[in-house]
Image (tube, rainbow, N blue to C red):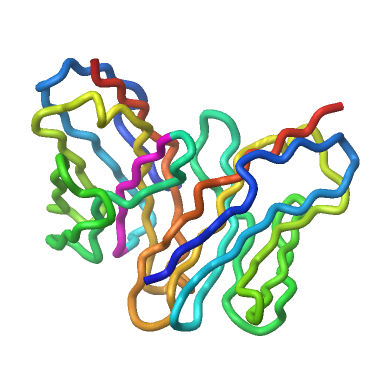
Amino acid sequence: NAGVTQTPKFRVLKTGQSMTLLCAQDMNHEYMYWYRQDPGMGLRLIHYSVGEGTTAKGEVPDGYNVSRLKKQNFLLGLESAAPSQTSVYFCASGGELLPANEQFFGPGTRLTVL
Amino acid sequence: AQSVTQLDSQVPVFEEAPVELRCNYSSSVSVYLFWYVQYPNQGLQLLLKYLSGSTLVKGINGFEAEFNKSQTSFHLRKPSVHISDTAEYFCAVSEKAGYSTLTFGKGTMLLVSP
């Protein structure tokens, strides 16, 4: 099992450009999450999904959109990137059968917006 | 809504010394508690979790944590640290009532020196 994978690992954008981050999991988990990590801020939840075709807003959703067309994939989109979106993005997944909302994390995507 | 406070942003310690990383939480309902570890340039890995039962929880790599309901704390301890324990440690909480997302603390950087 590959677990949770993220594509790409690194990306540099110019202000106003758009991009999509892809998260894939092969554990048949129902739940998937996108977080951003900034120095001194811990992990903050951007959006999450509790099943195929569903999405919900987290703590910091502004400037991002998501889609969950397939159970194993969760896409995070930036329509018009801003320097404030420079961050490390982590995807995670979890399942109904896992106790207490335990989550498995991907390796992260480091995004720089110039 | 739940919240987590990690009282120290950085903890320097010498190799083979004991260490305690502090975590306090706030919630109006019963909670599940977690500690995750993040090694440099990697994703988060589950260290240990408290679901119910015994308040002393043992995790991987010799770490343990104690749940104290009256003090709303979940401090992480290790009796003797190694250089390889240098990493960032995150405390997280989710509520037991229904479905709940994870809320993370801001992290504590453990720096182990020879």
Q: In this view, does A66 lie to the left or right of B31?
A: left
Position of A11 relative to B64 (above/below): above
Q: In which quarter of the image is residue B110?
A: top right
Furthest-right residue in view? B16
Total labels drawn: 0
Residue at (37% x, 41% y) in the render: A90
Residue at x 23%, y 60% (from the top left corner): A49
Where is residue A61 shown, x and y percent of the image? 20, 49
User: Based on the displayed image, in which of its 4 quarters is residue A56 positioned?
Assistant: bottom left
Q: Give the range drawn in magenta.
A: A30-38
Taking the magenta stretch, the answer to whether it contains residue A32 is yes
In the image, A107 versus A89, the foreground residue is: A89
Give coordinates of residue B66: x percent, y percent.
72, 69
Residue ID at (17%, 15%): A14
B90 within the magenta span: no
Question: For residue B49, what is the image quadrant?
Answer: bottom right
Residue shown at 63% from the left, 55% from the top = B47
Secondary structure predominantly adopted by residues drawn in magenta? strand
Quadrant where the image shows the N terminus of chain B: bottom left
**Residue B18 shown left or right of residue A8 in the figure:** right
Q: Nearer the viewer, residue B21 or A103?
A: B21
Viewer-nearest residue: A60 or B34 = A60
Quadrant position of the C terminus of chain B in the picture: top right
List x then y, in percent, for residue A52. 17, 61
**Is B14 left, or right, of A56 in this rendering?**
right
